[in-house]
Amino acid sequence: MRRSLSSALVTTLAAVVLAGAAIPAEAAGPRHTFASPSPSYKRTDSNGTFTAQVSARWMANDAVTMPWFFTVAPKIRAIAAGRMTCKAGHMQLPYSDHHANIAVTYTWHSSVPRNARNKNYDMWGHCAFPVNVGGKTGMANLRFSFAYRVSGPAQRSAVAPQAEEGGTEYHSELTIS
């Protein structure tokens, strides 16, 4: 495996790779707020599609489970040269998920249990897989982070607080070495 890629490979990948800084261990910026009647979130970028949701029928004092899904973007799948290994974790809760030797086309899914009300949370995911771009091989590292919170007691309201489209509550990054 090569430590660096040629400038031609880097140029080719520029159309595929989402530019950005490293994903922080715990984001301090904006976060998505799950609230009734808006219990879901979806974001698609150049690296894939991330979705998450909570039940719109939660009880006022119950901890909430947040199911989530991640699918690698077609342009990234096109350069994959093998299967991927993915791991997810959480900064505040004792949660982890690990899938080894899965297809790059797999919709990775899991659930983060025991989310308390009105608390900031940060989860992360990482997938690694071999790639081949124009005959050049390397290892892809695809990372994402999601900053969120679950609103207080369930209340119906006309406007639910949530991040604006394109906000920084979700971030993904692809690096190839």
Image (cartoon, rainbow, N blue to C red):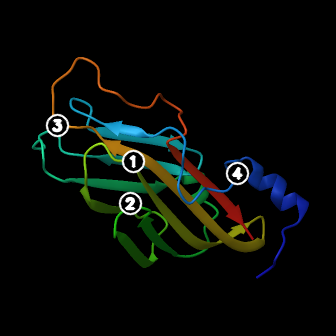
Mark 4: give few (<14), some (14-19) or many (20+) Cα within 10 Å.
few
Q: In the image, what residue occupies the spot 81% across and 79% down?
A: 2
Residue topped by disc 4? 21
* Badge 3 or badge 1: first in the primary sequence: 1
Of labels 4 and 1, earlier in sequence is 4
Residue linked to disc 3: 153
C-alpha separation, residue under disc 4 versus residue under disc 1: 22 Å
Q: Of helix, strand and loop, which one carries label 1? A: loop
Disc number placed over residue 120 in the picture, else none = 1
For the N terminus, the image quarter is bottom right
Give the CA distance from mark 4 to mark 3. Answer: 36 Å
Q: Which three-letter amino acid code belongs to the residue tagged 4?
A: Ala
Provide the residue designation for mark 2: 107
Question: Please, what is the three-letter code of the amino acid marked with disc 2?
Answer: Thr
Q: CA distance from mark 3 to mark 2?
A: 31 Å
Looking at numbered disc 3 in the image, what kind of residue is underneath it?
A: Pro
* Quadrant into which the C terminus falls: bottom right
Mark nearer the N terminus (4 vs 3): 4
Q: Quick check: can you spot residue 13? A: yes
Quick one: 168 or 99, which is closer to the camera?
A: 168
